[in-house]
Structure formats: structure tokens, C-alpha cells
Image (tube, rainbow, N blue to C red):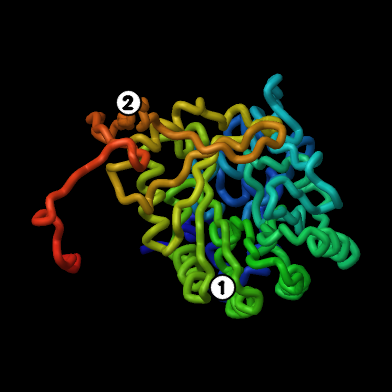
Amino acid sequence: MLHPRMRYALWKDVPDDDWNNWKWQMKNRVCTLEALAAAGLRLAPAEVQGIRREEERLRMAVTPHFLSLVDPENPDCPIRRQVVPRIEEHFVCPRDMDDPCGEVKDSPVPGLVHRYPDRVLVLATEACASYCRYCTRKRIVGKRLHTIDRDELARICDYISANRKIRDVLVSGGDPLALCDEKLDMILGALRSIRHVEMLRIGSRVPVFLPQRVTPALLSVLRRHHPVYLSLHFSHPREITPETARACEALADAGIPLGSQTVLLKGINDSAAVIKRLMHDLLRVRVRPYYLYQCDLAVGTDQFRTPISTGINIIEKLRGHTSGYAVPTFVVDAPGGGGKIPIGPGYFIALVEGRAVLRNYEGKIFEYPEPVEPGSIRVKLRKAELPEKAEPLLVR
């Protein structure tokens, strides 16, 4: 089968050793209108206008690997819409927010967000391998390309050290796996040295945008700081290429639990069929579906947002119709910093006279008796009814 990159004249003669080198991929990212045209994309007027003004919102940068998955003829390709700017990004509606998750107000020191009692978020870098057009951190990502230095990291570690309730640190950005091994090792090592930090998590889209980055050297760095968890971000089944599958399997083999956080996006994955296929494909490459996010209210993302009812309906068509492992939790990250709020179909109907009235995935109604307070009902058993010896439970 012909590799997708062979469709593009720009990369047809690139040696495999270069193509499979993550540094070559980063160096040769497509960042301009001219480069997209040279790659062979037939651009729609809305894309041309959006790219010409992209510096006003969020810069464009797409790895050759990810661009090779794009349909060059179709501007509505679900892969293409995620990374190629459109003029709609400059249509601002009253609902848009510069900081939709309220991270700034919950930042006691630069580069750190402390919202939940036992965990914090560290914004390690403003750079990514590629830039999602619906990014919730457009206010910082892709602009200065700043990465925390030793002094900033020391202040972050001092804050965490002084707050013994913090047991879980999520390192995100930007994308921490876009950093070099040495920088990543320094950041993880400093956080791991704090005695009451029990686990480290990394938020990353690198296995999707840049699977070549998952090298033996990177795996060695991650292993040094266990327990390390990876929160990955997949949006569409076509993102799970053979290269991405190998990267995920290598991470899993290194003892790193993998979870996926998927953003619900209009015209990209807003159907039960697409989400179900994505969840099944993720499980096949040992990634556990975790969250399905309602798209945040970031500036210029109205084109991607769906009604909340869309997410609820998708979960309803998954729950009971496929294995529970394939059903993510649908959440809204409450605007202004309220945190993640899970939302789902109404399976609990009422509580009536000590009975819970429930609806199953087929719409059938069932009752479940609530526990009875001791002494409220006396049950008498004759001595002959009492078993002399409990039989062991056998699972056949």
C-alpha cells in the first residue's frame, strides 16, 4: 500500500531515514501559505484568508506526518480542518473568552495552575508540534514559544513543596513531548524529587502529530520518573496511523498508562458512528478512552462548537451498545474556572418510596430497592431455614 506522503510531490523523494526522524519532521513543518500550496493542497478562499491573518490568532504549523493524512482536494476533510486556519477564526462572538477555563485567576505562580485540592497543572512550554485551530490556550500557545527555565521551575517546585496536599502534577502546555529529552528530563526530575508528589501526568498530542518523537531515548526518560501517565488527545479515527499505533504500543510497553481526551468538534467527529469507531480503534492500540470534552469557549472557535445535547446523544448511543471501556465521560469544563462537570443521559428517573426508578440503554424501566434502615423491618427465619454452612460461590 502506498504511503500517504507519496501523494505529495514535496516529500516524494525524502529518504525514509529523514521522514522517520522527529527532528526532521519539526524542522520541515508547513507554516506558510506558500508551503501548503507547494505541498499540493487546493486551498479554499476561506482558508487563504484565514492563513493570511493567522498571526493575529494562532500561528499555523503542521508536521509533514500529519499533513500527509489530509485530503488535498477537500477543505472539509476532518484532518485538514483541525490544522489549516480559516477566516471563521476571526469571527468573534459574544460568548468567546480569552481564558475560557479561568486559568489565570488560579495561577499562584507563573506557569502553574492550582484549581483542584490535590493536583496542579504545570504549563511547561508554549510550543506544540502542530497547532489545533480550536486550542483552548490560544492566549499563550504558539506565540513566544517560551519554555519554563530553571528559575521558573524552582518557583513552581517551591510552591508544590509548600502544599503537601498536592499529590498529582499534570505537565502540559503547549506540548511537553515537543521538548528535547534533556529539558523534559529536567522538568520531570525536579517534580519527581518532591516527596509528596505521587504521580506525574503529561498532556500530549505528539503521538498523533509526531509519532516519530517516541524514541528509545524518550522512553528511557519517561521510565526514570514513574509512575508517569500520558493523557493523549485524539480527534478522529484517521489519526491512528501505523506510526501512531507503534508509538502508543511502545509507550504502553514502557509501563505508561495511556488515556485519551477527545474534543467534540462540529463537522469533524460530532456523530456517534465516528466517536464509536475512534474509541474502538484507541482500545486496539492500548489507549483507554477517558474524556469527551465539550469544546471550550476560546476566541474564534464558534465554528467548532456543538450543542451540549450532541455530546449527550453520542454517549447514549455508546452506553450499553458497546463495552464500557469504550465509553468516555462527557464533560463540560465550566467557563471561568468551574472545573470539569460530567454530563450524561438521564438514566436515573426518580426515587419513590424507597425505590430507585431507573432506565436502561434500551429505554426499559427498572426498580432498585434502596437499603432499609436496621430495625425498620424485622425478618424472622425459622431455624430450619438457616444454612449450616455457606456454599462457596463458583464462577462457571
Asked whether 198 or 135 is in front, the reply is: 198
Q: Earlier in the sequence, mark 1 or mark 2?
A: 1
Q: Please tell me whether mark 1 or mark 2 is closer to you in this view.
A: 2
Q: Residues within 10 Å of mark 2 (few under 14, many from 20)?
A: few
Quarter residue 128 falls in: bottom right
The residue sitting at the left extreme is: 384
Asked whether 276 or 159 is in front, the reply is: 159
Residue on which the image places disc 1: 15
Q: Residue at x 55, y 52 (%)?
A: 233
Q: Residues within 10 Å of mark 1 (few under 14, many from 20)?
A: few
Q: Quadrant of the N terminus?
A: bottom left
Amino acid under disc 1: Pro
Q: Position of residue 263 (x, y in %)?
A: 54, 42
Q: Position of residue 7 (x, y in %)?
A: 47, 55
Q: Residue at x 75, y 54 (%)?
A: 123
Residue 110 lies left or right of residue 252; in this view the side is right
Alpha carbon of mark 1 to alpha carbon of mark 2: how far? 72 Å
1 and 2 marks in contact (CB < 8 Å):
no
Residue 180's tag is: none
The residue sitting at the top extreme is: 94
Quarter residue 157 falls in: bottom right
Residue on which the image places disc 2: 353
